[in-house]
Image (cartoon, rainbow, N blue to C red):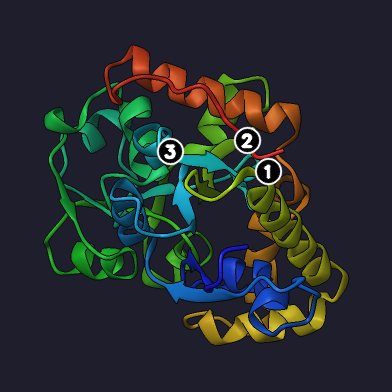
Amino acid sequence: MIDRPFTLGHSPDPDDAFMFYALAKDLIDTRGLRFEHILQDIQTLNERATRGELDVSAISIHAYAHVSQTYALLPSGASMGDGYGPMVVAKQVLSKRDIAGSRIAVPGTMTSAFLALQLWLDRSAKDIDFVVVPFDQIFHAIHHGEADSGLIIHEGQLTYKNEQMELCQDLGAWWSSENEGLPLPLGGNVIHKRIPASVRSDIARLIHRSIEYSLAHRTEAVTHALQFARDMGIDLADKFVGMYVNHWTLDYGERGRDSIRRFLSRAARQGLIPGAPDLEFVA
């Protein structure tokens, strides 16, 4: 047994807070396993994963292509856009051609949202005029002329109209229409391969149980998650959690795994990632 807390990285967002509620509040039996919760934005977690720093971490599926030699995917913890996902917005509706020629504010180059944007535009990052800003500052960047359009993730998908923004393209809807209704794979949980295989399986079971607990105790878990819901009341927070913590989160299933393979294989064919990794899941 490893005699120290395992570092567990996840974002300070309502969906992750909901997912890890039972673990964070010691509401399930961890059988002696201890965790140090580290809350950071997804771009930072992606970057830390490339350095192999955390034992367990939420990362973008895009980032998995760069860390698959170091980390294995956990079967639970997926964020899948089931007919919806990251959105391209602007002050007025722009065509795909107009967006391709605009300066786009994006939340990070290793996010799945940015990879989906490149796939949709059929352009690599070097051929896109973009500026990286914190995800919660994208509306500000557009309003202040730092960008013409923005790639929004998290709760911005529900609040963009309040910011006087128009939807130009929902990338989750686009992906679904191109892939027989499959969800757009956005995020997942990974575990470092330095951890013994038997312990990896124990941790996988605990995360599954934590998600199950929150789904079974939804009201109290959403109330806990509300502290991380920026400018959202409980009803909107509950809606957001429901978008990204659901049956896909308990287990990708074969359709979810197929969607990851398609997503990364298509990106590899277009030269957007080094290659399409074999998916390695913890049993």
Residue placed under numbered mark 1 in the picture: 75
Instruction: Judge by depth and name the residue closer to the eye, 103 or 209.
Output: 209
- Residue beneath label 2, please? 281
Of the residues shown, which amino acid type is indicated by label 1? Pro
Q: Position of residue 243 (x, y in %)?
A: 66, 56
Cβ–Cβ below 8 Å for labels 2 and 1? Answer: yes
Q: Nearer the viewer, residue 219 or 203?
A: 203
Q: Nearer the viewer, residue 135 or 211?
A: 211
Residue 35 image point, x, y percent? 57, 73
Query: What kind of element bears circle 2?
Result: loop
Q: Work out whether 50 lies above or below 166.
A: above
Disc 2/disc 1 C-alpha distance (Å):
6 Å
Q: Identify residue type, mark 3.
A: Tyr
Residue 82 lies, in percent from the top left, at 65, 41
Q: Secondary structure at mark 1?
A: loop
Q: Which of pointers 2 and 3 indicates the residue nearer the eye?
A: 2
